[in-house]
């Protein structure tokens, strides 16, 4: 059968941890890149390159679509490897941009987002290239403004805490207008990595986006969200309905723009218990993914519930 899909998470300490996406019950000790059969790269060269040619050079990586083929369930010779968290502070080149420009300027300026997306690929020759963006990027298209504050993280300026606010949310019905930077970023990246790697897009799962919007910031205690789930679940469900429909459209638009594989991140899954996961998270993730698959039947979708090992059976 197909090899499991492998992605890397890079931390500030520069340690590397591996997570295996495959059988829900299969666990393995961390593997090195050489153990997984990943190509050994010369310093500064991409997978498949024999000289320092540009990313649009003539050299073809024979494993350029190994991630795509594996995600489709096809048999491959080794596990595909890519960076889960894309570019980041572990790279000096990335830090140079983050010290000069705020996050949304970097993620919404095509020239910068393209460069930051390609940095890990140039350095490590990964089997997947992920566009530089954020799971919160589509929120302003729904009427939820946010920014990323240096030193404290994402901030939702007006948290969603009432049914009237939910009813006032807008649909993502014209992404070319509301996220005009997305198409030039993904279409350019697709051209850059064609024949060399697989281009991945990503979205946040409905519950994670809703919880972020209710809390107004990253908060592991999720006091406001859990209080609403307990006392006003109808508001949470109405909010989740809106996010589900629109995040699926946003994801499908990424495919239209050039993404070959989509990742759906349930980043806050570890902040809730199994029953709440089954009530507020998984059903809406399933519906979003079903809508994505209906629109893009040939595009593999990877669902990742952060910290969801405690209820793997419920992720089926």
Image: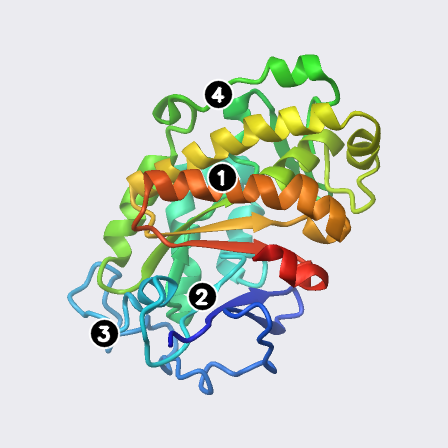
Q: Residue 230, image x and y in percent?
A: 83, 33
Element under disc 4 = loop
Element under disc 2 = strand
Q: CA distance from mark 2 to mark 4?
A: 32 Å
Q: Residue furthest left?
A: 58
Element under disc 3 = loop
Q: CA distance from mark 1 to mark 4?
A: 15 Å
Side of 137 relative to 220 (left or right): left
The one nearer the camera, 264 or 312, is 312
Q: CA distance from mark 2 to mark 1?
A: 24 Å
Question: Which residue is tagged 4?
Answer: 171
Q: CA distance from mark 4 to mark 3?
A: 41 Å
Residue 62 tag number: 3
In the picture, the quarter occupied by the C terminus is bottom right
Q: CA distance from mark 3 to mark 1?
A: 33 Å
Question: Which residue is tagged 2?
Answer: 82
């Amino acid at each position: 059968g197909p090899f499991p899909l492998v992605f890397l998470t890079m931390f500030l300490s520069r340690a590397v941890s591996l997570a295996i996406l495959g059988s829900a019950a299969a666990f393995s000790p961390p593997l090195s890149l050489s153990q997984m059969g990943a190509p050994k790269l010369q310093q500064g060269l991409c997978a498949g390159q024999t000289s320092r040619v540009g990313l649009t050079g003539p050299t073809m990586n024979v494993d350029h679509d190994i991630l795509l083929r594996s995600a489709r369930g096809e048999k491959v010779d080794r596990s595909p490897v890519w960076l889960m968290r894309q570019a980041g502070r572990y790279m000096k080149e990335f830090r140079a941009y983050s010290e000069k420009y705020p996050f949304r300027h970097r993620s919404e300026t095509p020239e910068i987002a393209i460069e930051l997306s390609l940095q890990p690929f140039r350095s490590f020759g990964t089997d997947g290239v992920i566009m530089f963006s954020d799971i919160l990027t589509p929120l302003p298209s729904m009427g939820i403004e946010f920014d990323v504050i240096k030193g404290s993280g994402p901030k939702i300026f007006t948290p969603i805490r009432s049914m009237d606010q939910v009813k006032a949310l807008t649909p993502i019905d014209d992404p070319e207008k509301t996220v005009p930077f997305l198409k030039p970023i993904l279409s350019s990246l697709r051209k850059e990595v064609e024949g060399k790697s697989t281009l991945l897009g990503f979205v946040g799962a409905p519950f994670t986006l809703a919880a972020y919007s209710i809390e107004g910031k990253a908060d592991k205690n999720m006091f406001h969200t859990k209080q609403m789930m307990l006392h006003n679940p109808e508001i949470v469900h109405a909010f989740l309905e809106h996010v589900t429909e629109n995040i699926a459209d946003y994801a499908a638009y990424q495919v239209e723009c050039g993404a070959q594989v989509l990742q759906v991140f349930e980043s806050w899954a570890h902040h809730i218990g199994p029953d709440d996961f089954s009530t507020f998270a998984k059903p809406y993730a399933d519906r979003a993914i079903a809508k994505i698959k209906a629109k893009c039947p040939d595009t593999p979708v990877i669902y990742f519930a952060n910290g969801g090992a405690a209820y793997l059976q419920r992720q089926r």
